[in-house]
Every structure is written in C-alpha cells, then in structure tokens.
Amino acid sequence: MQALYYVGPEQLELRDSEEAPLMPGESRVRIQATGICGSDLHAYHGHDPRRQPPLILGHEAAGEVVEGAMTGKRVTMNPLIVCGHCDYCLEGRQNLCSNRTMVGMTRPGTFAETLTIPDHCLIELPESLPAVAAALTEPAATALHGVNRLERALFRPLSEARVLVIGGGAVGLLVGLILRHKGVRNLRLADTNPLRRRTVERAGLAAFDPHEKVPEPDSFEAVFDCVGAAPTRDMAVAAVKPGGAIMHLGLQDNEGKLDTRAITLKEVAFLGAYTYSPSDLRATVKLLDSQCLGNLDWVEVRKLDQGAEAFADLIAGRTPAAKVILEP
C-alpha cells in the first residue's frame, strides 16, 4: 500500500509500505478520506516528542472495513485505543484512560490506503453520510465535547450567552457551527488570517481580526480558545465577563503567564477539554448526517500524494480551507 510518512522535522515522504498484520479483535479499514489535524502539523514541525519518525500520521478518517468482523461496513473510528478497565473507562470518560494509545501517534495512522484498528474503535456510518463529511467526525466531536463541557459551567443557558471563539481552524469553525445549532445568536469568531475569516463568513458566522479590533474587556459570558497560545489565553482572560467561563481547546504552546489573579477576582471557570468520549463521537455522526452544521463547503479535498504540498500550504496560510481532507 501507499502511505504518507513523517520522516523528520518538516519532511514527509510517500512510500510503498507493507500492510500491518491483522491481530485478534481488529479490522482492516480501507481509508476513503482522512483529515489533516493541527496536531499533525505540530508533529510535522518536530514539536511533538510523542510522535517519533518514521511514522504514518493521521487520525481523522472514514472508510470501509475490508477485513474483520464488520467487513463491508462503512465506518469512522475513534483513534483513542483504551483499556476498558481503568477507573476513567468505567466512568465513561475513556478519553482520560490511564493506558490509552492512539492511531497516528503510538501506532500507524490514517495517511495510508489501509489501517488496522481494534473493532471497539469502529463506528458504523449511515449510507447518507459521505466519506469526506464523515472524516470530520473526530474534530467535530472534539468541538462538541468542549461545548458541552463549558455549557455545564455557565450560570445561565448557553443560548443566552455572548460568545467569543478564538481561532478559525477546523475546531474553531466547528465550535461556532455547533454553538449556532444550539441557539447561540450573539457569536463572534476571531482569526488573524484573512482567508480563514472569509471562509468563516461564508459559513454564516461573524469573523473579525483581533489585531485590528481587540475584543472588548469583560464582555463575553463564554470564550473558546481554539488556538491555545500565550496571546490567545491573554485575550480570553481579558474578554471573559466576571462569572463567565473559558474553554481551552487549543494546544499550540505552553508559554506565557496565565493571569490567575484576573481569573480569581472575576470568578471565572477556566476549563480544558481533551478529545471526546465514544458517546460524543456517535452523537457527532448523527449531527453531521443531519446536515445541521451546513454544507461543509469550507473543506478542501486533495489526493494523498499531494499531502506534502497540503502541509506546506496549511503552514504558510495559503489555503482558505479550515480543513484539508486527503483521499488515498
């Protein structure tokens, strides 16, 4: 099979590779669509010690089972491989599993023609959901998990809140679309890339450049930081109203100083959210199939052999797409 390998910092190679042997309790999936995640870009720069080259990256995917218990079924997948018996798994918080491993990190990922994965990670897709849309399940579930977690921290219903989303990448845009679906009407999205802002606006959301217009201090009941950098954390803490909540979803860096004094004096709930639960993934498949998040025309589709060029374009900000999907 062909696979796109991360072979070193800012180096990707399309290689012929042997298919992995199928282990008991696993299935082989023929990948039909797979998305490039921000964490893949982070690894590409050599900034993720958990992802060691040579490695097939990728963990957002949809395809068809060609060998295993669900042969012939169209599926998406949970890239988190969990133990099923630790306290977190038993509580239904499998994303925090003490023994988790991950596709595209500790085992070969989805930037390939096929993938082997445990059967318990597979989620059957409705026939009405195309593979490209289904490949958005993983980032959309991340967004949904974050929205639901923040919503539980608010004093009043989320639909009543004034909401700021920082970052117009896939997760930020999906957060915005999910918030709109949940009835939020006072919503603004900040992004410094003009191409991304135009994409956000085409999706029907209001976007602005935070360099040109700084968000008003103490003015948003809910803030989603979908970048996760020192300047965006500062922006979130300044913009959130007293008694409000911040959801930290991005993982760009761990720099700077968090203004814990402001968080304390304003009695702000500062929350993190990591990935999703299996229930989040299944709910997201239904959400995408309902088409309530729009027509998803902000997704760009390229072939797997164009993967290296796609990475370069995303890093340079040359594409307006919030998500690039590769087709093997």
Image (cartoon, rainbow, N blue to C red):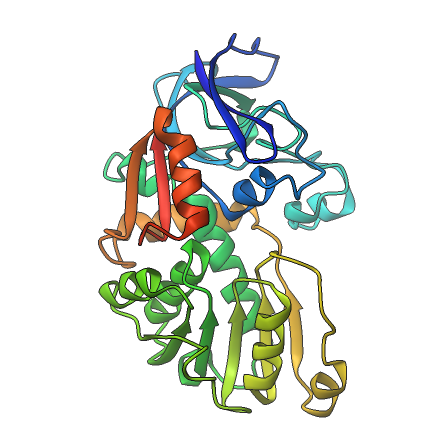
Q: Depth check: 50 or 158 in front?
A: 50
Tell me residue 231's x, y (percent).
60, 72
Q: Depth check: 221 or 129 in front?
A: 221
User: Height in image: 32 above or below 153?
Assistant: above
Q: Residue at x 72, y 38 (%)?
A: 49
Q: Depth check: 34 or 193 in front?
A: 193
On screen, residue 106 versus residue 282, left or right, reads: right
Residue 256 can be seen in this image: yes
Residue 75 can be seen in this image: no
User: Height in image: 91 above or below 45?
Assistant: below
The N terminus: image quadrant: top left
Q: Residue at x 67, y 91 (%)?
A: 266
Q: Residue at x 46, y 19 (%)?
A: 3
Circle count: 0
Q: Residue at x 51, y 35 (%)?
A: 59
On screen, residue 85 versus residue 189, left or right, reads: right
Tell me residue 123's x, y (percent).
44, 35
Q: Residue 155, located in which quarter of the rendered image?
A: bottom right
Tell me residue 20's x, y (percent).
56, 11
User: Height in image: 321 above or below 124?
Assistant: below
The C terminus: image quadrant: top left
